[in-house]
Image (cartoon, helix red, strand yellow):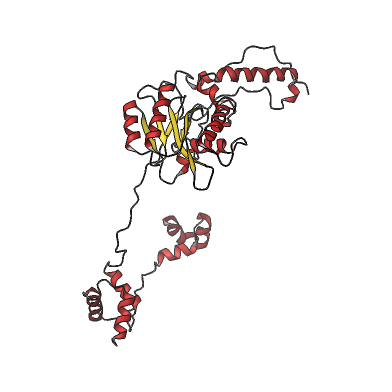
Amino acid sequence: MQATEALAPQAGIAPVCSALGVSRASLYRRRRPRQPSRRATPARALSEPERREILQLLHSERFVDAPPAQVHAALLEEGNYLCSPRTMYRLLAESGEVRERRDQLQHPRYARPELVATAPKQVWSWDITKLKGPAKLIYFYLYVIVDIFSRYVVGWMIAEAENAGLAERLIEQSCSKQGIAPNQLKLHADRGSPMISKTVAQLLAELGIDKSHGRPRVSNDNPFSEALFKTAKYRPAVPDRFAALTHAREVFRGTFEWYNNQHHHSGIAYLTPSVVHHGRADEVLDRRHRARLAAYLAHPDRFVNGPPQRETLPPAVWINPPEKTTHQDGSGPTIADRDDPEVVPVCPTYGTFDKLRVTPRPLATAPERTH
């Protein structure tokens, strides 16, 4: 704008503004800035003594707890009119006296849980869901603990009640069966009554397990348990209602046997949870890759995208991945990408990401493709 002012007397305002891309209206407005206008006090406005009289009346013992609309109505019944209810509100607002007078409930701000697992037995998630019983309002309760990296169900039970004592027994037995050492595991859950109980908290402290809880009314903070319940309860073999507790246990015994050993999970390269949990993922992925390479050697023209690439497990699995840094863009998925610079998994079972790449066994050289 200063250059425009300097060149305008020599070359003219219009050519200079056009050459510099400046609007002439902006130039003129800068030369003659608009003066703030003062609104004249209306003749019908209340005088200062009248304003003080109204405020004193609103502050009086008679009307101190009454809203302006009721004050206005009461004065009219007595034959007095001072001002409208809206004017009373305006005077109170100018004095800083218009607000919610009752104490409002302030919900605490809960931190978003951020958990990562780069191998089995690092982070478990557990939850409880209802199962419909033989009649209305009769329920059984399914307790399930799942490893978020391998998706392996490490412990489950069905009971007629939902309480902390049963949860404590399930957690303790599952940790003993899996050989969990102190300071090895993090256990995540929502904020249900058994999950936040002192009984469970004391057990976790004794076992050296870090506890984590989701935020209230945020189901996304416990996605692995919720997804497991959806998969298990929607199986054709699982009925809508269960005749008895023994019936429910029998059905879910078969369901979790299928889930751990036969269900090819999309989140773990379509491996079964048992294969990943017990460290046999590389063996199975190598076998798959050799089968694809053999098919490629037999019919390379059917692989339009070139030689098949070996599948790999996700290097890390998150509950609420952290916000992306400046060298990344967008929010990340629950399963970390292999190219994510924030993820460098190191664990005794799977090693670093470089070790996740298994070079296929040497086979015969593929024939050159002809066109």
Point out the residue furthest to the bottom here: 79
145 vs 98: above or below = above
Q: Position of residue 164 (x, y in %)?
A: 37, 36
Figure check: 68 above or below 186: below
Q: Front-most of 39 and 323?
A: 323
Q: Work out whether residue 39 can be spotted.
A: no
Q: Nearer the viewer, residue 81 or 344?
A: 81
How many numbered marks appear? 0
Residue 303 against residue 65 in the figure, above or below: above
- Residue 254: image quadrant is top right
Residue at x-position 30% and y-position 69%: 93
- Judged left or right of residue 150, residue 111 is left
In the image, what residue occupies the spot 40% across and 34% down? 166
Image coordinates for residue 309, horizontal then vertical, percent: 63, 23
Q: Nearer the viewer, residue 120 or 190?
A: 190
Examine the rendering and report whether any part of residue 234 can be seen: yes
Residue placed furthest toward the right: 371
* Quadrant where the image shows the N terminus: bottom left
Q: Quadrant of the C terminus?
A: top right
Residue 5, percent across and down?
A: 43, 59
**Residue 201 at what x, y percent from top left?**
33, 34
* Residue 77 left/right relative to 153: left
Please tell me which residue lies in front, 120 or 367: 120
Q: Is residue 41 above or below residue 365?
A: below
